Image: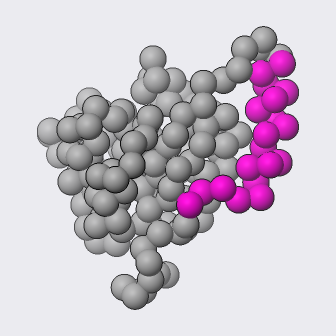
Amino acid sequence: MNSDNDAGLYGPAGSASMSACSAVTENTSKMTGQAPAKRRVLVVEDEMLIGMLLEDMLTDLGHEVAAIVPRLKDALAAVERESYDLAILDVHLHGESAFPVAEALIAKGVPFVFATGYGERGLPETYRGRPVLQKPFAKDDLERILKTLIA
């Protein structure tokens, strides 16, 4: 568990898994005959293992994880200072709602998906109809929901 004294970031994404996954991306590109569109993704997730899982899955799918951010204030700062192609938001971050991050992303025109174990019914009415990645999820679920964001 992170303390309030930590930096609030798991760090910039880009682990040893990225080099291992580049071979998967290259092989996929050869099979389909076209390179996948690489997107910069912001992951807002307070559970470190889920953040790491998302990083591996997104990298496998050919995307770049720009940052994994576990705290609301850090997520808001990340949206303010960086640009992203899309984002994945855990609904609850250390007891705080991620909805201010959703509003900041909407204001910047960045598509996003909510990741939650509660499904769409766990969202306020304002956000119903937004894409939801139901926890627990598999890579196929993530790929399917990302296609709806990118389309």
Q: How many marks?
A: 0
Residue located at (40% from left, 88% from top): 5
Q: Is residue 2 shown above or below 21?
A: below
Residue 43, how many percent across, how many down?
Answer: 47, 52
| Residue at the extreme left | 126
* Residue at image point 83% right, 19% down: 30
Residue 93, how many percent across, how many down?
A: 34, 65
Q: Is residue 143 left or right of residue 22?
A: left
In this picture, is 16 found above or below 113?
below
In magenta, the rendered stretch is: 12-30
Of 118 and 113, the residue lying toward us:
113
Location of residue 14 (image quadrant):
bottom right
Visible residue check, residue 137: yes
Q: Residue at the spot x=34%, y=35% of the render?
A: 110
Q: Split into 4 quadrants, where in the image is the C terminus?
A: top left
What predominant SS class does the magenta segment belong to? helix
| Horizontal arrangement in the rendering, residue 33 relative to residue 134 (left or right) | right
**Does the magenta portion include 75?**
no
Task: Residue 150 in the image: state x and y as whole percent.
Answer: 46, 23
Q: Is residue 50 visible?
A: no
- Which residue is drawn at the image coordinates 21% and 54% (left, top)? 100
Find the residue positioned furthest to the front: 81
- Tell whether 76 sits left or right of 33: left
Q: Position of residue 69 (x, y in %)?
A: 44, 62
114 lies above or below 150? below
- Residue found farthest to the top: 33
25 magenta-colored: yes
